Image: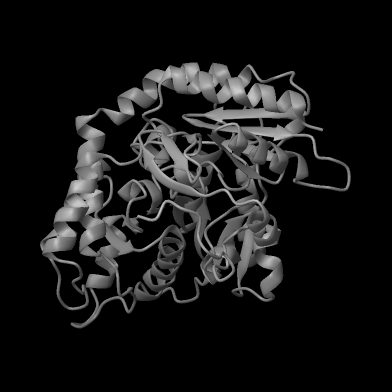
Amino acid sequence: MNESRPASMNSFWMPFTNNRDFKANPRLLVSAEGVYYKDVDGNSILDGTAGLWCVPCGHAQPKIVAAVREMIGQLDFAPTFQMGHPAAFDLAEKLMEYSNHRFGHVFYTNSGSEAVDTALKIALAYHKARGEASRTRLIGRERGYHGVGFGGISVGGIAGNRKPYGVMLPGVDHLPHTHNLEKNAYSRGEPEHGANLADELERIVALHDASTIAAVIVEPVAGSTGVLVPPKGYLKRLRELCTKHGILLIFDEVITGFGRLTTPFASDYFDVEPDMMTTAKGLTNGVIPMGAVFSKKFIHDAFMDAPPGIELFHGYTYSGHPVACAASLATLEVFKEQAILDNAKAIQPYWEDAVHALKGLPHVIDIRTIGLVAGIELAPIAGKPGARAYAAFKKMFADGVLIRVTGDIIALSPPLTFEKKHIDELFGKLTTVLKTLE
């Protein structure tokens, strides 16, 4: 692998990046192992974000690396349209086991964005298959992030992701977000206030009628918008209302799945059963792009009652890619063999205390924690939203720590293999940086 600086950086149009600012002073990573990256200058960079929420088991896990190498030499590609390969079926069974057999089936995609659009399409087709074709409306939530497909940004509620593209999918409505800085600041776990916001679904049902609504999709914990934790009882109430009105409930677990809350999925943590669940990221430990939609058996069975033929006209060239399946199978083995969730549970209290110790530092106006996730909200600079957190991001990288920022919120989500010494390093340096911000 080339570990030197590229001859030119002009041709790569970078995603979700201030391209001009980055290319003026690039941050280039060239290798990774354990919980550290190494940059092009040979500096170690502590990974405070598990890559992009997607490396729960740490980098360069030997079992995963070996599995990928073996599969790519054995079966580099195999289509899954009207044929298959063993690893795709083996993985599906293992995923059912990992989810404690609470779901019946998985549909493979290549990313979280594709998983969301797939779940939305399945929801629409499910109601049609049952003779309720009038159920076409989709309900998202303000400040929700569901990837960058047209379906995902339609049900999503982040203005910056929608504004450049004009008209989205028709027939979409949004629940209010649950963030309440006045009542819930500095919460540990689920905040006390806001469960009643789930009742806004009743207002939407009254406005449109339940017979027109196909699905509600929410992140159990909203990640990309700045770590918004659901109030106590909120998700259970949403489940009750969806059941009452015959609406499918979809949890977007692209971020919260695979241990982020110290449980297999957020649905386990909150003890709430969605009808479908979208996943990606930690599914393969970030090694190979892959996503999956977990579906309850009754949804799948509604399609199997159709006349003989293709039951669902949907899929991707790389659905169930053999190398991705190998990576995911190995990831599940690593979770089990290295007791990844046990480690996450063990260090969670230490993590939480370290995050909340930042209270009182300059510019910090809120701290939110749940599992191994933290949101640290900073007061914005007047007329320059996001500038203060972005300055913190650049200072932290220069000091050897990778963090993520969204607006003026620092979002942290370390590999689940973090140890106390890594927590001390991260927050020691973050404390220093926060004290130096303008």
Q: Quadrant of the C terminus?
A: top right
The reply to whether residue 185 is in sight is no
Q: Quadrant of the N terminus?
A: bottom left
The percent coordinates of residue 19 (x first, y second) are: 65, 61
The reply to whether residue 153 is in sight is yes
Say whether residue 414 is left or right of residue 296: right
Say whether residue 322 is left or right of residue 1: left
Q: Nearer the viewer, residue 26 or 187?
A: 26
Q: Residue at x 34, y 23 (%)?
A: 343
In the rendered view, how is the structure colored?
A: one colour
Q: Residue at x 88, y 48 (%)?
A: 383
Q: Residue at x 66, y 36 (%)?
A: 395
- Vertical position of residue 41 compared to residue 320: above or below: above
Q: Nearer the viewer, residue 107 or 411?
A: 411
The percent coordinates of residue 307 (x first, y second) are: 21, 82
Q: Residue at x 38, y 26 (%)?
A: 344
